[in-house]
Image (cartoon, rainbow, N blue to C red):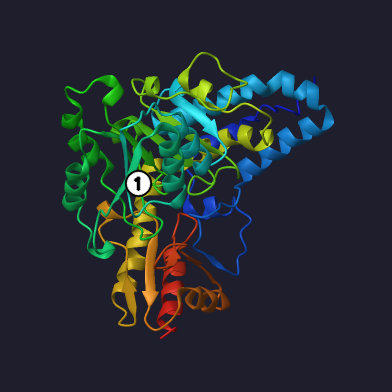
Amino acid sequence: MLGPEALAVPSADQAEAARSPLGWAALRSEFRLRRDRVHLGAFLLASHPAPVRRAIDRHRRGLDADPVAYLHGHWLALEAAAHRAAAAYTGARAADVALTDSTTMGLALLYNGLHVRAGQELLTSTHDFFVTHDALDLKAGRSGATVRKIQLYDQSGAASADEIVKRVVAAVTARTRVVALTWVHSSTGVKLPIRAIARALAPLNRGRAEADRILFCVDGVHGFGIENVRLPDLGCDFFAAGCHKWLFGPRGTGLVWGRPEAWQHVTHTIPSFTDSGTPGTAMTPGGFHSFEHRWALTEAFKLHQRVGKARIAARTHQLNSRFKAGLAGMQNVSLHTPRPASLSAGLVCFEVRRMAPQEVVDRLLRRGIVATVSPYSPPLARVAPSVLNTPAEVDRALRAVRALA
């Protein structure tokens, strides 16, 4: 087994620094992002902050030096630590958190494992990512269930929480077994009122047999790491997210959380190597993973908690509100993301009149602004101001958009 350098104990100075509040400039200094660009793509793939990089390197050196001893000596403890860190961050029980490699893996495992029978219905929206649609189609093909997609709003920029809830409730029938929705749509930036939907679905479950109850499943990746919520308070039954976006976690990490009462309705797909008798560990896929990344996930959760979930939520919304307000004042721009914080999070989708979205993104990049194009129909230009940005960077990006006219 390796020596103490493999699992080094922090010094007193390091421990004190970990307890100290972290300002925005100090947080930004933890990342190796190019300083000549305004990075507005946090929703896609995160840069690793210093604590995550150090943990990855520490575990990698241990595995490279003595893979068998390091794996056997630390695997269960480090995996359990990641479960506990996820639980502490989400406000959930560690027993109810499964570790995955991505949102896609989590959704696929969840929908494949749900107990669904022929004649039942899987309800989703036209706005969801193709992974949800494909996973539900595959489940329907195997189970004899059917998939139905509904439109939650007609114009994203004018979306209404009440209208969204009404459309979901109106679409539910006696055959509906699953309601599969996305917290924040990466196509438009619309944030769904998950709590309100959950409250509206609750009465519809009264009197249903367990095998017929509606299971509310959420792709939460674009709210996870932004919104200051506890997962048990959202009201959904299952929640899947990657951790390598807004959480700034190691690339190739994610989780699935389920309500304790809901886990009886799902069976794991891939045998677990770390099943300790809890639903979360049973749902955690076995096999050999990029261990150094999964084990470093603990540091990402700790970093976010050190900064403060409430502070991160307030800062992210502040920067995005600033961006939306700036775009709304431009005659050559159509804003597709709702301005209220209650209906949006960290994504801003827009189009510049008479200009293809890819041209918008390309021209912004020439000015040092990193944006992306949404892979939907219709495609839109997207930016995602995060806590790694400053108000001055938001203003610089707005000037660049204004100059496109």
Give the image location of residue 128, x and y in percent. Answer: 38, 51
Give the image location of residue 50, x and y in percent. Answer: 63, 46
Whether residue 355 is situated above or below residue 304 in the rendered picture: below
- Out of 355 and 227, give the one closest to the viewer: 355
Residue, x 82% and y 27% (percent of image)? 66
| Residue 56 seen in this snapshot | yes
| Residue 178 seen in this snapshot | no
- Outermost residue, right direction? 65
Left or right: residue 69 versus residue 254 is right
Give the image location of residue 3, x and y in percent. Answer: 79, 23
Q: Quadrant of residue 188?
A: bottom left
Report the amino acid beneath label 1: Trp
Whether residue 366 is situated above or below residue 277 in the rendered picture: below
Q: State which quarter of the image contains the N terminus.
A: top right
Residue, x 64% and y 56% (percent of image)? 32
- Out of 339 and 15, give the one closest to the viewer: 339
Residue labelled with disc 1: 183
Q: Secondary structure at mark 1?
A: loop
- Out of 221 and 306, give the one closest to the viewer: 221
Whether residue 338 is situated above or below residue 91 in the rendered picture: below
Residue, x 19% and y 49% (percent of image)? 167
Left or right: residue 29 versus residue 40 is right
Q: For the residue carrying disc 1, how many other residues have a C-alpha within 10 Å: few (<14), some (14-19), or many (20+)?
A: many
Give the image location of residue 187, x and y in percent. Answer: 39, 59
